[in-house]
Image (cartoon, helix red, strand yellow):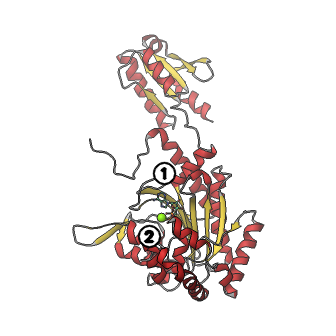
């Protein structure tokens, strides 16, 4: 039998409500901050990611699903959402439109990783992008949107960690300090870290190998090297968050996995997600658009991993319960009453009332069982007598009560109940 590819997951109908809930909360929270949805392709030219995400990152170095299409062009399944949004923003000349540009996306993303709990090859993200605003208010808005999203999901134990990784100016000095620190340890570090040392030593702070982590723990901190402007920016972000009631801790170890970050970086972490503790990550990336041949446009944003959120929500007990079944189940007895059920069902559905009729040629008893099992709210049995009398009994399966209703008044009867 052909099975699902490794690292992918099916969402079966019994779980769909959990996804719909989390997507609904995401959309509503984004809308409350006036962010609008953007949809970009699942695949892009490979170059977009090697340039946009950066060729010193794990994503570009080892995780991309890249292939040649039939025309011989190299394309890649998006490993994240930001690069595609930035491309669309530039391509459609949106920097000439209303700024700031605020958008959100709900997407699937693809990374060739070793599958584990909370780490898949096809996974899903909710992300926000805010372009055009350089001030600390934009960082604070994006972080507070992320915080509101998690709170609206009912999560209480997810913690916000923030840091500043400075700008190109102060980071140059910091890179030197890092290199001086790592040089005597370099021989004991992993091959990836040796490559990072040459290309981007800050990335060594993000290594997941135990030995490297221990060494990195003693490294100099970016916060001690921030220039005056970067310090002032970070202080303002912290002050705004504090006044908005967003609790955080400053964590100098956060550097984020992508090349394009500058100044503010942040992560929301939870113990409940197991080894993959980060459920949401983001920051400011003022050089990204420039890196993609646009004129410089300041930018900030985040992405949350939906599968990890679901794990944390399960652990914190805030997953929603599945909603009940249809409102009305119409049980037919013989050919004529089944036909009438089918007709009535159509009229009810046209009024937005969900209803079902038998498609399995079941006995009335078996239809009752089915209606009960699937959580139908009301059941109506139609037979020869009901058709003759032009009246049916509407049984409330939850309340246990019953009412007699004229056939021609059924639709109005349920419409009134809805109100
Ligand atoms: P990690 O350090 O765990 O690999 P990352 O830095 O690569 O994460 P980002 O690129 O910042 O992750 O993606 C944002 C969020 O998307 C992460 O915080 C996480 O919740 C989620 N995410 C990233 N990779 C995966 C994956 N392979 N499977 C499931 N979720 C993921
Ligand atoms: Mg990763």
Percent across and percent down for residue 327 are 53, 30
Which residue: 61% across, 53% down?
Answer: 271
Answer left or right for 352 relative to 145. Answer: left
How far apart, in angstroms, are the residues tagged by discs 1 and 2? 19 Å
Q: Residue furthest top?
A: 385
Whether residue 318 is visible, yes or no, is yes
Quadrant of the image occupied by residue 169: bottom right
Quadrant of the image occupied by residue 301: bottom right
User: Could you say which is closer to the camera, residue 243 or residue 277?
Assistant: 277
Quadrant of the rendering where the C terminus is positioned: top right
Q: Residue furthest right?
A: 243
Compared with residue 386, is residue 358 higher up or lower down, i.e. above or below? below
The crowding category of the residue bearing disc 1, from other C-alpha atoms within 10 Å (few below 14, some 14 to 19, many at least 20), is few
Whether residue 92 is visible, yes or no, is no
Percent across and percent down for residue 57 are 45, 73
Ranked by sequence position, the earlier of labels 1 and 2 is: 2
Q: Secondary structure at mark 1?
A: loop
Q: Is mark 2 within 8 Å of ligand 2?
A: yes
The crowding category of the residue bearing disc 2, from other C-alpha atoms within 10 Å (few below 14, some 14 to 19, many at least 20), is some
Percent across and percent down for residue 191 are 42, 73
Which residue: 76% across, 72% down?
Answer: 239
Q: Secondary structure at mark 2?
A: helix
Answer left or right for 143 relative to 129. Answer: right
Which residue: 45% across, 14% down?
Answer: 365
Percent across and percent down for residue 183 are 52, 83
Quadrant of the rendering where the N terminus is positioned: top left
Q: Which residue is mark 2?
A: 58
Compared with residue 22, is residue 43 higher up or lower down, i.e. above or below? below
> Which label is found at residue 117?
1
Answer left or right for 219 relative to 387. Answer: right
Which residue: 31% across, 45% down?
Answer: 3
> Which label is found at residue 135?
none
């Amino acid at each position: 039998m052909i099975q699902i590819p490794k690292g992918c997951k099916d969402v079966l109908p019994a779980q769909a409500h959990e996804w719909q809930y989390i997507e609904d909360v995401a959309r509503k929270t984004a809308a409350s901050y006036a962010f609008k949805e953007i949809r970009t392709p699942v695949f892009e030219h490979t170059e977009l990611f090697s340039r946009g995400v950066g060729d010193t990152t794990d994503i570009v170095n080892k995780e991309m699903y890249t292939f040649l299409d039939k025309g011989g062009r190299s394309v890649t399944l998006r490993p994240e959402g930001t690069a595609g949004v930035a491309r669309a923003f530039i391509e459609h000349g949106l920097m000439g439109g209303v700024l700031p540009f605020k958008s959100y996306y709900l997407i699937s993303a693809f990374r060739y990783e070793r599958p584990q709990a909370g780490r898949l090859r096809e996974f899903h993200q909710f992300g926000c992008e805010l372009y055009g605003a350089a001030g600390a208010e934009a960082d604070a808005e994006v972080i507070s949107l992320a915080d509101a999203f998690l709170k609206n999901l009912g999560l209480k134990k997810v913690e916000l960690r923030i840091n500043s990784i400075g700008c190109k100016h102060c980071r140059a000095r910091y890179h030197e300090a890092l290199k001086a620190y790592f040089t005597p340890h370099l021989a004991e570090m992993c091959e990836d870290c040796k490559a990072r040392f040459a290309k981007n030593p800050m990335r060594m702070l993000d290594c997941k190998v135990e030995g490297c982590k221990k060494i990195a723990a003693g490294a100099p901190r970016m916060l001690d090297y921030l220039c005056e402007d970067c310090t002032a920016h970070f202080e303002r972000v912290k002050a705004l968050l504090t006044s908005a009631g967003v609790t955080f801790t400053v964590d100098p170890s956060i550097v984020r996995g992508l090349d394009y970050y500058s100044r503010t970086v942040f992560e929301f972490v939870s113990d409940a997600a197991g080894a993959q503790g980060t459920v949401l990550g983001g920051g400011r990336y003022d050089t990204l658009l420039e890196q993609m041949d646009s004129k410089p446009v300041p930018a900030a944003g985040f992405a949350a991993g939906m599968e990890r959120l679901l794990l944390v929500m399960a652990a914190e007990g805030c997953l929603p319960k599945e909603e009940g079944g249809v409102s009305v189940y119409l049980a037919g007895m013989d050919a004529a009453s089944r036909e009438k059920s089918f007709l009535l069902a159509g009229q009810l559905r046209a009024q937005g009332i969900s209803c079902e009729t038998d498609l399995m040629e079941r006995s009335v008893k078996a239809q009752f069982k089915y209606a009960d099992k699937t959580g139908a709210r009301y059941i109506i049995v139609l037979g020869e007598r009901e058709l003759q009398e032009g009246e049916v009994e509407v049984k409330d399966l939850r309340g246990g009560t019953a009412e007699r209703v004229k056939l021609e008044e059924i639709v109005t009867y349920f419409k009134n109940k809805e109100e």
